[in-house]
Image: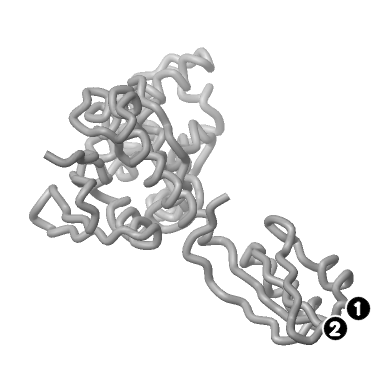
Amino acid sequence: MADKLRLGLPKGSLQDATIALFKRAGWNIYADGRSYFPSIDDAEIECMLIRAQEMARYVDHGVLDAGLTGIDWVVESGLDVTSVTTLTYAKQSRRKVRWVLAVPESSGFEKAEDLEGKIIATELVEVSKRYFAAKGVNVKVEFSWGATEVKPPTLADAIVEVTETGSSLKANHLKIIDTVMESETHLIAGKAALADEWKRVKIDQIATMLRGAIDAQSQVGLMLNVKRADLDAVLAVLPALNSPTVSQLSDSEWVAVNTIVEERVARDVIPQLKRANATGIVEYPLNKVVL
């Protein structure tokens, strides 16, 4: 039987974003809504959809060789798995998410210490217990099966809940009084898988391509032509990832410049390049940036 890497993909809120990331990285994953075993156009990978909360357990036990999950759930599990690379993406954005301590707007609670003796509802039970213990605050932390935002003030005095934007908390008349932890997606692997040379190389391949796809999301390529006499002025404008590539054109007085910049600065850089006498400026999207 040919070698296979058993890869866990997060089922639920991260599923669509994860499949889209793999597509940008070069893999097409086809998920049937009724199956927990999506197909992938790589004969060396076998995928399985697993809840992010359980991923570390199955990787640690060797049921899966590797998987994608939030570092929050790895910390919550307390299991000894290896983080191969960080992948900062979430359901709605390319930012880290936060687990926050939130209370009803009308409660009068302003800090964690105000919750002495109170009930805290959360899915992140062990992390929350450690958070309050570190502050010397005695609370009762209860596991929440979901819809945590609706529990205060009737079913809990406060919650520890994950948020990207805070909009859901505001909609339920809750205010954030502290951040318990930040989290982002990680590619994790088990010790046995990393000890297997073939699997380790395959995991490294996946990590490199996913990381490259993530890094490319916020960057664009720029290419342009400029007279050699104006080259220094053009290079002074460019906030390059690395040194720009400068190539001689058929006309010895002209060169071509190719570089990568952050997409958010391109709108400022391009007019400056034009003022520095660059011509034929082209901005183009990137699929992957591998450093």
User: Which quarter of the figure has residue 156?
Assistant: top left
User: Which quarter of the figure has residue 268?
Assistant: bottom right
For this orientation, the residue located farthest to the right is: 229
Of residues 35 and 62, the one nearer the viewer is 62
Q: Name the residue tied to disc 2.
A: 253
Which structural element holds mark 1?
Answer: helix
Percent of width and height locating residue 13: 30, 51
Of residues 171 and 282, the one nearer the viewer is 282
Kind of residue indicated by mark 2 = Glu
On screen, residue 12 versus residue 114, left or right, reads: left
Percent of width and height locating residue 195: 33, 24
Vertical position of residue 61 compared to residue 151: above or below: above
Kind of residue indicated by mark 1 = Ala
Q: Are marks 2 and 1 in contact (CB under 8 Å)?
A: yes
What's the mark number on residue 98? none
Vertical position of residue 101 compared to residue 191: above or below: below
Vertical position of residue 278 compared to residue 13: above or below: below
Quadrant assignment for the N terminus: top left
On screen, residue 289 versus residue 233, left or right, reads: left
Of residues 116 and 28, the one nearer the viewer is 28
Instruction: Mark 2 or mark 1: name the one nearer the start of the chain.
Output: 1
CA separation in Å, label 2 and label 1: 8 Å
Q: Name the residue tied to disc 1.
A: 229
| Residue 106 visible in rendering | no
Which residue is depicted at the point 91% across and 78% down? 229
